[in-house]
Image (cartoon, helix red, strand yellow):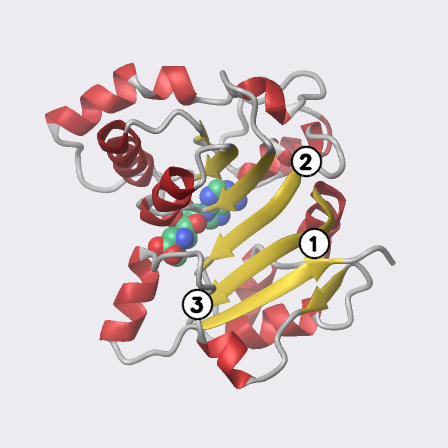
Amino acid sequence: MNPPSESKGDTADLRFYGRRKGKPLKAARQGLIEELLPELRIAVPEAPLDPRTLFSQPVKSIRLEIGFGGGEHLARMAADNPDIGFIGAEVFLNGVASLLRHVHELGLKNVRVFNQDVRFLLPHLPAGSFERISLLFPDPWPKARHAKRRFVGPENLKEMQRLIVPGGEFRVASDHPIYIDWALLHLVGHPGFAWTAKGPEDWRTRPADSTPTRYEEKAKKQGRTPVFMNFRRVSP
Ligand SMILES: C[S@@+](CC[C@H](N)C(=O)[O-])C[C@H]1O[C@@H](n2cnc3c(N)ncnc32)[C@H](O)[C@@H]1O
């Protein structure tokens, strides 16, 4: 990726492999990028950032969604929980525009957007910043030679462990068998996380307080079964 000029330290050599742009945006969405995004956008921090200061009203806790895609899940969660602050990170411009449309239509006041690789934000945030982090249908990078590109991995899990408050949740969902195995391999037995599933119903069923994402709908239409892996952050 092109590291933002403000970024520094360990993040300087991070590379993003996904898509940044799709079809040209329609005028209304381009308008939201120009007018609403600057109000909601989180810039790459130059100093430690207390995420509570990002919201214009006090929030009782904060959640992060990494790679929110079209933003339908993030927007629904934000509408259902107006006293919680939501930070969404997404690199794909068309996805950001789609989230902005939801935010605008629903009149949401509790959403902020980091429209870059989330790894440029995380190191600047204090420990225990989030009560929940969601990583829903991350790019699977199924080829073994691309395994290092998968978001779940030792480095990012160190950050997830640091940033989720003890007792908080890390929600990972995937419809890709290779990614599901990979996520479980890294997370089950990890000292910072406890898998909350007691049996198959728990990983076959989306958490009751959430809504499907676009990728979940697509997976189901194409006959793939989504798996919901929820972990509680525990103190080692
Ligand atoms: C397969 S899509 C899933 C989108 C959405 N969560 C859903 O379920 O519909 C994965 C998304 O994660 C985004 N993404 C991947 N790595 C990211 C990163 N490091 N920071 C921010 N977004 C990222 C990609 O741009 C892509 O839109």
Relative placement, left or right, of 114 versus 158 is left
Q: Residue at x 72, y 57 (%)?
A: 154
> Residue 236 lies in what quarter of the image?
bottom right
Residue underneath mark 1: 157
Position in image of residue 3 (x %, y %): 54, 29
Q: Secondary structure at mark 2?
A: loop
Q: Secondary structure at mark 1?
A: helix
- Determine contact: label 3, label 2, CB under 8 Å: no
Judge the density around disc 2: few (<14), some (14-19), many (≥20) Cα neighbours within 10 Å: many
Q: Residue at x 14, y 25 (%)?
A: 28
Type of amino acid under label 1: Leu
Question: Which is more toward the observer, 230 or 24?
Answer: 230
Residue underneath mark 3: 206
Type of amino acid under label 2: Ser
Residue underneath mark 2: 129
Whole-angstrom CA distance, mark 3 to mark 2, is 24 Å
Whole-angstrom CA distance, mark 3 to mark 1, is 22 Å
Question: Which is more toward the observer, 203 or 147?
Answer: 203
Q: Residue at x 55, y 41 (%)?
A: 63
Type of amino acid under label 3: Arg
